[in-house]
Image (spheres, rainbow, N blue to C red):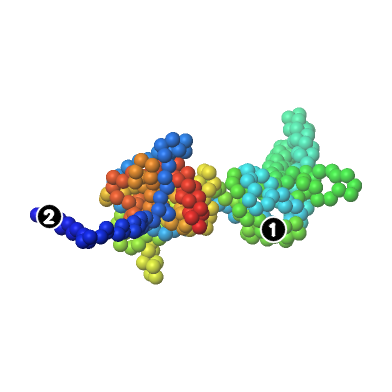
Amino acid sequence: MIVVFVIAMSACGSRPETPEVKTAVEPKAPHPDQSNEVRLDAAAQREAGIETGVVERQALPEVLLAPGRVTLNENQSWRVGAVTDGRVVRVLVNAGDHVKRGQVLARMHSHDIHESRALYRKATAELSRLKSAEAYAVRQRDRAKRLFEIKAGSLEQAEHAETALRNLQTEISNAQIEVERSRTHLVEFLGIPADEAEHLDGQHEEDDDLIPIKSPADGVLLERKVTAGTVTQPGADAFVVTDLSVLWLMAAVPEDHLKDVRPGMPVRVTVQAYPKRGFLGRVTRIGEQLDETTRTVKVRVDLPNAAGLLKPEMYATAELSLGATHPALFVKEAAIQEVKGQNVVFVRKAADLFEARAVDLGRPLDGAREVLSGLRAGERVATRGSFILKSQLMKSSMAEE
């Protein structure tokens, strides 16, 4: 029961004084911190193209994360050098150039050119002499045969002429082999014409008199190790050409997970330069030796690189699927913004109110990111136009300051 007490005051024989009336100001309740909230009415949201979506749980594949390093594909890399001693006269390419198979990278002078051409000229002259002798030997044989047929010559003379002709023909065959050998050395090994071109007076070191160093394949000139004037030796690298369309990733897989790795299994690779993009590869080889310090095994992944975004020596992380899954919360990548160094999403609190909520993010999956903390399933967040909300939030923060 509620009892109300009324106290009345009266004064006998006198009029009571009228009390002074004062307006009482009730203290306002402190407002909650609104520095992380943004208000936009429906019209402004439509104009900004803001859309929202519900935070849902999805099945996240369990993966093994292995650190690695992007390297050249050794099956598609070539170390190009000179085929003989010489001095580089001209270099025609620079590091980073795209080159074609057979393209001349440099030209060099070598004494081998003059020596080989001299041998070729000598072999050609010898062949010409032997062919002239053969023509004479044919005539001698034919004359000996006619004399023997008319009983004017002996059988011995006829057989001697036939033997001389056959010996000459054998010498011609050997001379032809020597001519072809010396020509092949000039044309196919040294890469210059067998016959020396005639040059105008004062012309020296024309292309016909210089040995070309050619690219063995299409690719990118990764290294250039010579300049004009460099003296080269056979076996010394002058250029490195590589095809960057497929690279290798050398991943370090822990010993206890070797049972989960097999050749041919798909791998998703991420690098620091493109943290939101995954590159798909495939395991091609599992190492035979365990690193005694890290207790890991090198696993080689073939990594297609048609767009040329990946570079040798990049550090990377390989994700190898283990087959199992577990539930996890996800938001679209477009919903995530960075505010004051934190990843935030804008959670709808009312029709015209959004709260900037800090979140911890995990792995990406099909254009979305795993949310480790900061959100609950069923909450609605801005999935499009979140940058507009971020801009409004920053404006409000600057106005308050």
* Farthest-out residue, front: 13
User: Residue 294: horizontal and vertical position, in percent?
Assistant: 39, 68
Q: Residue at x 12, y 55 (%)?
A: 2
Choose between 349 and 34: the one closer to the eye.
Answer: 34
Write down the residue under mark 2: 2
- Label 2 SS: loop
Choose between 159 and 238: the one closer to the eye.
Answer: 238
The answer to whether residue 172 of the structure is visible from this angle is yes
Q: Amino acid at mark 1?
A: Val
Write down the residue under mark 1: 226
Q: Earlier in the sequence, mark 2 or mark 1?
A: 2
- Label 1 SS: loop
Q: Is residue 284 left or right of residue 401?
A: left
42 to 313, vertically: above or below: above
Task: Count residues near mark 1 (Cα–Cα under 10 Å), then give few for <14, some for 14-19, many for 20+.
Answer: some
The answer to whether residue 71 of the structure is visible from this angle is no
Q: Residue at x 15, y 58 (%)?
A: 5
User: Residue 307: horizontal and vertical position, in percent?
Assistant: 53, 44
Q: Amino acid at mark 2?
A: Ile
Q: Residue at x 39, y 70 (%)?
A: 293
Q: Residue at x 45, y 46 (%)?
A: 389
Q: Quadrant of residue 350?
A: top left
Marks 2 and 1, how far apart at CA: 104 Å
* Farthest-out residue, right: 201
350 to 66, vertically: above or below: above
User: Residue 86: horizontal and vertical position, in percent?
Assistant: 73, 58
